[in-house]
Amino acid sequence: MHIIAQLPSGQGIEQGGWRWPGADKAAFINEDVYVKGAQLAEKGKLDGFFLTDSPGIYVDMTKMPPHHSLDPLMLTALMAKATEHIGLITTMSTSLHEPYNIARAMRSLDLMSKGRAGWNVVTTGAAPVLLNYYPEILNHDEKHARSTEVWEAVLKLWGSWHKDALKLDVETGLFADSSLIQPINYKGKYVTTRGPINMPPSQQGMPVIFTAGGGNYGYEFATTKADAMYSNPPTLEYAIAFWKSMAASIRQAGRNPDQFTVFNGIGVSIASSEKEALERRAALDELGDPKSRWQYLGYMLNIPTSGIDPDKPIPAELLKRAYPSPSDQRSQYAYDLVKKGFTVREVLAHGPINYHPIFLGTPESIADKFQQWFEAGVGNGFSVVPDSGLDSLTDFVEQVVPILQKRGLLRTAYIGSTLREHLGLPYQNGLPEQKVIATSAK
Ligand SMILES: Cc1cc2nc3c(=O)[nH]c(=O)nc-3n(C[C@H](O)[C@H](O)[C@H](O)COP(=O)(O)O)c2cc1C
């Protein structure tokens, strides 16, 4: 089992997390919170710490922090100095950056972390983010065509400095073999870069290629070009079917699905009993925007929610009219919970409308859930999002991880030193077919 950890906005998955007792209210701009998060993930011998990124504001600022604020590259640079083993995966959108910027920044992180970097390749869908960079929203097909070019140019730039080029020969005075550091002269329709890159490969060659995206283009990119994917499955059934389809497509592309990990995003809420975990989640919900959640639940069940009492089950006459919405796959779970007679608050505390499925309860029962999903075949990986920031990540690392380790599902010590080694990937520098051509004899 492979696990990476996330701390969205420095506070966790819940909208009202910044109001949680004891939480740093301004964690979203506190770099120490993120660095501590990476150190905690390393304490748990996890594979990596993961930072998504969409630079812009598209939430109601009266209620919550922006999803992304501090520059994740700068955060990972701090993390690199504060940790020794944990992988550091950060997002750089192919729509928002030039290939040379990405190649240089990610290689810097890879060298500074001694081979622990991962590049999360995204195309960015959010209009408020794209409009920070362009006068208007990009044409969808062109955005993806550009993305493929950026990916190709970045990998070629990385491969433009051969791993044997650096000589550092004090005796002869040969610093580097320049025949092994060559321009790539990349000229695409959307991006152009001459190269070569201005520094050597790291211990793992180049960063691990992650991706996170929906739609046909995202799927095609993941199965033909990436090593790992951050996915957001609405249900276990979806996650199983998704990995089955991914594995077949990866094989079809002539690649090995054993060398690919899907990191399924999972929220965790840990307590000493299931009842307590539900109470904890209900209290967190209350700090967010409970009314909009009740409304969304009504949408999922096709019933009006104005005037309902959140502390009571849905009235019987309304329940008769309810049915799960086919447009949201999580609706069936919400419907099942309502049918069991939980109150509206309790139904929502189970997490049927959260961005990620929620594993809640005791450390033991949460470990059971991870094992159940893992054994059901969901692509071997999880991206864990705590419910209320560092305290909840601490509970995960100190209480759930040891159980998974005891069951032989998670490593108890790092064996390799690079992120590629953590994920069972071979050394790679540049595109597989790329060779630096020696043009000058030494
Ligand atoms: C699970 C998941 C995570 C994503 N994370 C990011 C992110 O961190 N930054 C970003 O700019 N876009 C992110 N995206 C958006 C994708 O890059 C992509 O734009 C989106 O899936 C819409 O596809 P489109 O670009 O084809 O319209 C994410 C998408 C998904 C499904």
Image (cartoon, helix red, strand yellow):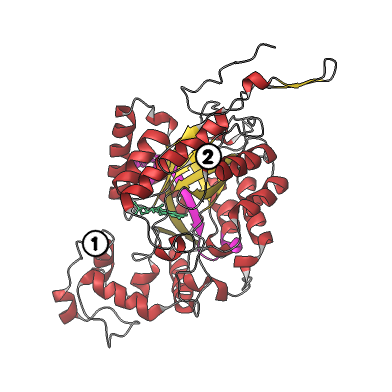
* Residue ranking furthest to the bottom: 307
The count of marks equals 2
Is 274 or 97 nearer to us in this picture?
Answer: 97
Q: Nearer the viewer, mark 1 or mark 2?
A: 1
Q: Quadrant of residue 248?
A: top left
Is 423 or 67 nearer to us in this picture?
Answer: 67
Determine whether the residue tagged by mark 1 lies in a helix, strand or loop: helix
Q: Is residue 379 magenta?
A: yes
- Quick check: 270 above or below 181? below
Residue matched to label 2 = 410
* Residue ranking furthest to the top: 441
* Residue ranking furthest to the right: 171
Q: Earlier in the sequence, mark 1 or mark 2?
A: 1
Q: Quadrant of residue 196?
A: top right
Q: Position of residue 342 (x, y in %)?
A: 31, 73
Determine whether the residue tagged by mark 2 lies in a helix, strand or loop: loop
The residues colored magenta run: 373-392
Residue matched to label 1 = 332
| Residue at point 36%, 71% (across, down) | 348
